[in-house]
Amino acid sequence: MGAREVEAFLTRLATRENVAASTQNQALAALLFLYREVLGQELPWMDDIRRAKKPLRLPTVLTREEVAALLDAMNGVAWLMASLLYGAGLRLMECVRLRVQDIDFVRHEITVRQGKGGKDRRTMLPALAVEALQRQLAEAQRLHARDLAAGFGAVFLPHALERKYPNAAREWAWQYVFPASERSMDPRSGVERRHHLHETVLQRAVKNAVRRARIAKPATCHTLRHSFATHLLERGADIRTVQELLGHSDVRTTQIYTHVLNRGGSGLASPLDR
């Protein structure tokens, strides 16, 4: 199979309905693996084949009233986590993986560690979530104390920290802000630990809240992050500041949120509204 045959195959794949760009690129990667790793043939010409580009998709954004209705339809830990997704612009996994040491009540900051791309960043801690977050930490500390008394209390530590600091896994600062209700066996180490709350708990809670609030949009947990960015820009926040809060490497990624600013992405009024 030569360059033209490979490109023709990928073109046929691209023209099929419901075939995503990622699927096309995966097919190309599979062909590269077949020739280089299985057949032992170097194919430098395959590097010149055009990769499929993902189509630009505008994010779903809720209005302030829709966000309020969604949060009103939630309670407890799910409400708090959803409030942080919207109030701090956190991604779903960034929220569930928060540790005690990541919360700074004095500076009203949340530190996101090892976010997308392995980057750390700081974002805001919304004042309306402080009291509920303090109650959640108090409950998590009581749970941690019971685990320690039972001979457990250690959590998973990233990278090689567990070897470098053997006692850190039991320290309060490293515990999860949103711990799971039950301990479980870590399949990697065989150690019984208390992991963080599973992300599907919040996903289901948001899905149910969207239904109860009768929001006619395909809203998910990530929609709250989109809404965070859009509403900050609507209030006049500098786009570079929003970029840093979101942890985007390129400001062009952040600029997608300008599509809903008042009168369209260009900021111009429709001639119908003159």
Image (tube, rainbow, N blue to C red):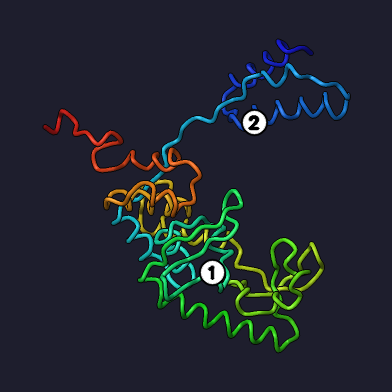
Circle 1 Cα neighbour tier, 10 Å, few/some/many (<14 / 14–19 / ≥20): some
Question: Tag 2: residue type?
Answer: Thr
The residue positioned 43% from the left and 71% from the top of the image is 75
Side (left or right) of 234 relative to 166: left
The residue positioned 72% from the left and 67% from the top of the image is 161
Residue lying farthest to the left in this orientation: 274
The residue positioned 54% from the left and 30% from the top of the image is 54
Query: In front: mark 1 or mark 2?
Result: 1
Residue that badge 2 annotates: 23
Circle 2 Cα neighbour tier, 10 Å, few/some/many (<14 / 14–19 / ≥20): some
Residue that badge 1 annotates: 102
Mark identifier at residue 28: none
Indicate the quadrant where residue 23 lies.
Answer: top right
Residue 119 position in % (x across, y down):
57, 53
Indicate the quadrant where residue 87 lies.
Answer: bottom left
Residue 7 position in % (x across, y down):
68, 15
